Image (spheres, rainbow, N blue to C red):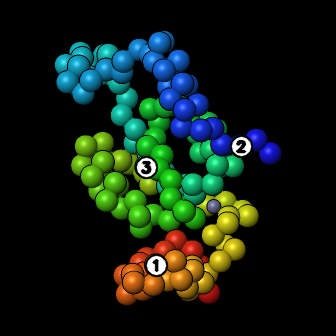
Amino acid sequence: MPSSPTVQELLKRNAQSAKNHEPIPTLTEISQLPAEQQLPMPKWFIVSCCDNRIDPFEILGLEKWDAVVVRSCAGRIAPQMQNLLFLDNVLHFTDVMIMHHTDCSAELFKNDDLRDILKERAPEESATIEELRLPGFDE
Ligand SMILES: [Zn+2]
């Protein structure tokens, strides 16, 4: 199994990518474009699981400007609500999609089990941990 890249490798990749980087238009530049040159703003807000086996752009055949795709554990929308409300104020989404998938690792544990593990790791934070909204299943 290949290992994850190191920080040094990522920095090297970033430096390589920066050599060919073309800056994206700024928001000011976009707002000053004539109507016929305006960029399409995403109208879909899609929440998907952060499982790397799932690629909503690939699965749904999306182009870059079709959707804002955010990821959260188990594809839960609750952690994304602030992002949705903030961005909707600007983009005026027409649709929201919650995209779950089979074989989600969130099915492997229950929230109470995770709380117990977290409390073992940080017993001084037990009260805070007890109040956490977790993405796993409760039953
Ligand atoms: Zn998942």
Kindly report the distance in space between the C-alpha atoms of the residues bearing marks 2 and 1. Answer: 28 Å
Q: Secondary structure at mark 3?
A: strand
Q: Position of residue 115 (x, y in %)?
A: 52, 82
Q: Position of residue 10 (x, y in %)?
A: 55, 32
The mark lying in front, picked from 3 and 2, is 2
Picture residue at 45% right of the left edge, 84% below the top: 123
**Residue tagged by mark 3?**
45
Kindly report the distance in space between the C-alpha atoms of the residues bearing marks 3 and 2. Answer: 32 Å
Q: Mark 1: few, some, or many residues within 10 Å (few <14, many ≥20)? A: few
Residue 24 or residue 38, whichever sits in front: 24
Hey, what amino acid is under mark 3? Phe
Q: Sequence order check: which comes first, mark 3 or mark 1?
A: 3
Image height of 56 relative to 32, above or below: below
Kindly report the distance in space between the C-alpha atoms of the residues bearing marks 3 and 1. Answer: 35 Å
Residue 112 or residue 33, whichever sits in front: 112
Q: Position of residue 139 (x, y in %)?
A: 62, 87
Image height of 45 relative to 24, above or below: below
Q: Position of residue 118 (x, y in %)?
A: 51, 78
- The mark found on residue 130 in the picture is none
Hey, what amino acid is under mark 2? Ser
Hey, what amino acid is under mark 1? Ala
**Residue tagged by mark 1?**
122
